[in-house]
Amino acid sequence: MTGRTFVIAIDGPAASGKSTLARRLAQHFGFAHLDTGALYRATAFLVLEQGGDPADPVTAARAAGLVHLRLLLDPRLRGEAVSAAASIVAAIPCVRRALLDLQRNFAAHPPQPAEGAILDGRDIGSVVCPEAEVKLFVTASAEERARRRVEELRRQGAAAILEDVLQDLKERDARDIERRAAPLIAAPDAAVIDTTMLDADAVFERVSNLIARALAVQR
Ligand code: C5P
């Protein structure tokens, strides 16, 4: 392996399965994983906790400055109110700037003993780690993503209505795609994986083969 950390960038829309895939890949390859959506969720959570307005740049940027890695595991980041507010704070350029160093630092110096880093989000291949050794864009139709999210919520014992979940996903997609600051986009050199017709094992197999080939070239 060369001195540089081996970095895998995984981008894609909400509920495309990218974080689950990233976790599984991290375990398989012994890499460290950063779910960058959790950074925006943590920012939103800190704003809401203080009764602030997620759309206010000063409040949101101050909250982004307080985000630390331990907070990312807090289950309260997964609630619906935080999910909606996360895509609002994520559209504010100074929030994105405030979170950039943390992400780049994680990619360059993943916690030991990991030899590489996997970051998943919306702008990893395009903005955060444009030099990543492997770039993936994981997507699926909005209907399929909504169906999977409903299944997951019901497994957790929460009541979920497909139409509501689909509507919410479409709104978050629109905010992520249409914002001016680092919009959701597949980097030109990313491998696009459409998982609409694939199960999690098939996606994992396809992607882990691709990474193994890239690692063999690097070593
Ligand atoms: O992936 P997740 O749903 O947890 O992300 C929460 C929100 O954070 C997304 O709706 C998106 O607006 C934002 N996000 C982002 N850039 C990233 C990761 C997430 O803008 N790299």
Image (cartoon, grey):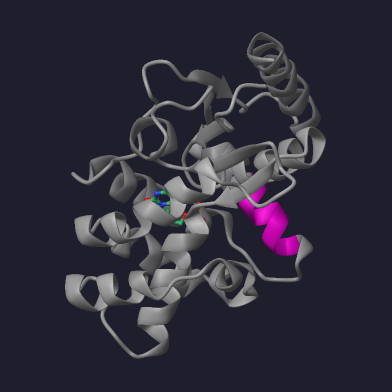
Q: Is residue 82 above or below residue 49?
A: above
Looking at the image, which residue is at 28% across and 73% down? 60
Across and down, in percent, residue 10 comes to: 53, 34
Across and down, in percent, residue 48 comes to: 38, 82
Looking at the image, which residue is at 38% across and 29% down? 130
Looking at the image, which residue is at 49% across and 52% down? 36
Q: Nearer the viewer, residue 101 or 56?
A: 101
* Residue 187 painted magenta: no
Q: Is residue 116 left or right of residue 163?
A: right
Q: Is residue 108 left or right of residue 53?
A: right
Q: Is residue 49 above or below residue 105?
A: below
Quarter containing the N terminus = top right
Q: Is residue 78 above or below residue 187?
A: below
Looking at the image, which residue is at 21% across and 55% down? 93
Quarter containing the C terminus = top right
Across and down, in percent, residue 83 comes to: 46, 65
